Amino acid sequence: MTGEVRELYQELIFDHYKRPRNCHVLLDANHRADGHNTLCGDRITVYLKVDGGIIRDVTFEGDGCAIATASASLMTEALKGKPVTEVAHLFEEFHEMVTDTDASAHPQLGKLEVLAGVREFPARVKCATLAWHTLNAALKQQGTTVSTE
Amino acid sequence: MKTEREIFARPINPEFGVTRWREDFPILRERVHGKPLVYLDNAATTQKPQTVIDAEVRYYSHDNANVHRGVHTLSQNATDAYEAARSKVQRFIKARAVEEIVFVRGATEGINLVAQSYARPLLSPGDEILISAMEHHSNIVPWQLVCEQTGAVLKVVPINDAGELNMEDFGALLGPRTRLVAITQLSNALGTITPIERVIAAAHAKGVPVLVDGAQAVSHLAVDVGALDCDFYAFSGHKIFGPTGIGVLYGKAARLDAMPPWQGGGDMIRSVTFEKTEYNDIPYKFEAGTPNIAGAIGLGAALDYVSSVGMEAIAAHEHDLLEYATRKASRIPGLRIVGTAKDKASILSFVLQGVHPHDIGTILDRKGVAIRAGHHCAMPVMQRFGIAGTARASFALYNTRDEVDALIAGINEVRRMFQ
């Protein structure tokens, strides 16, 4: 298998695909949104509990590919306990990482950096960002379904 | 059913024409990620033979002008070539008259035309349109739109676990309020060939006209609209080795004659005053504006190509490939074929346990193997089988057993990665 494929499907990705973290309905959520990838029909729901400007809890559920699922799982881990004000910057940073052709390091992204391999697969950027777009919609409390189109 | 030995045994000249056919398609010499292209996404769109590419280049290099307008030579040449393409379509699908051939953008536009121009003026609240559970979105949404506009109701004939149309249910759903049956001849998501002759006979027995969505069928099955006796038949050029943006709506002359125009503009009128406009005859009544002249000419060249190879040879070759691929895929642990109808053509749709189709598609692509992953614009089919999507390999006349082997090797590699 080519190096790029191995770079994309790293062990940590498989780990979060097969055992996604925070993958359940959040009963006391005060924000939620549905997202879907019109390209493949994947759907995701992101739940948030925000209190005092801090993300106290964040979960997701849905059916997606390895990249979409692992990205959602890693996102929930990264965001728990973070101030809401940091989300926009983090997403910007993440988006830059998965779309930039130059392979600059993004140390502030921590474990999320494992998704950097997506940049070699433009058709899969939407998979990696689906959870993030849905999160944004949830924070804005848009009741409607978001799409990565 | 052939025995395994018969299927795997290579006849003396197993792929009699395929080596030669492959040479006709320049894109098949491309490499993808350093690997020879294995193009197995033919149900999405087919590749183009050199003759089709040349026909468009020749038209733009030598004959380009508007049709049905000018007195000058080029306009006459363009008109002749455009109308010659219409005659080629007529002969190819065995329509009785050339005016029964309407050029449209594709099957989607053809179906929308029938929905808006045939069905809409006819439908009253409570009337019914009957489709099947294996339709492409393009044979669902136009009917939903016209139902919203008229208060008519969309009824759906269910399919069984193999992906076959349930004919008993069809008979039961074909009722006194059914105004039109619209059904695919070959399912793009499952590969099912529908018993279209029986559907048409049953519908006609009750005086109900039938539209056949031939988008998938036209490049795999010999189509004879006269023998089928369907009222409408729609297909896209790009799925039969022609250009994108050109397609055909066949309609029985009497039906087309009785229908109001769909779009207004140039070429579809006989005379215009501000008080009254007189419409042109069929098919021009339905071809408002400058048509896709080059596309029609390219489609004509594509149909010439298919005729020169012969639909019988194509069908036999594809049948061999599908049987070979089905048998090989069935042996892969954790792989389930979605769509196992007795009567099938050209499509192998499958799911792999623990692996999302999207991931299969990405990994195969890096091996040069192009397949489609997802819902194939047939989300209700996916819901019927309780899945989000499938991976789909779809074959055309230029595919080979070696390419099937590359697909199978790729799937096995995916399995190893996801273990």
Image (cartoon, rainbow, N blue to C red):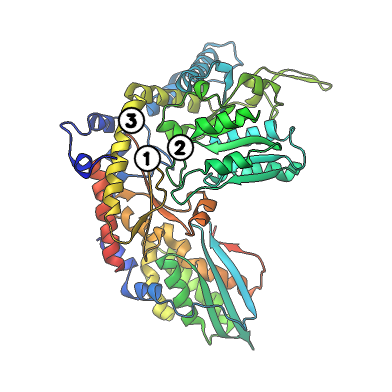
Using the image, determine if residue B222 lies above or below residue B187: above
Is residue B257 visible to us here?
A: yes
- Label 3, label 1: how far apart the Cα atoms are: 10 Å
User: Which chain does the residue under circle 3 lie in?
Assistant: B
Which badge, 3 or 1, comes first in the chain's sequence?
Answer: 3
> SS at mark 2?
loop
Using the image, determine if residue B13 lies above or below residue A30: above
**For residue A106, which quarter of the picture?**
bottom left
Using the image, determine if residue B323 lies above or below residue B359: above
Return the residue at label 3. Answer: B314
Return the residue at label 1. Answer: B346
In this rendering, would A23 be left or right of B125? left
| Label pair 3/1, CB-CB below 8 angstroms | no
Residue at the spot 52% in from the left edge and 19% down from the top edge: B95
Amino acid at the residue labelled 3: Ile
Amino acid at the residue labelled 1: Ser
| Label pair 1/2, CB-CB below 8 angstroms | yes
Locate residue A93, reporting x and y percent: 47, 73
Return the residue at label 2. Answer: B216
Label 1 environment density (alpha carbons within 10 Å; few <14, some 14–19, many ≥20): many
> SS at mark 3?
helix
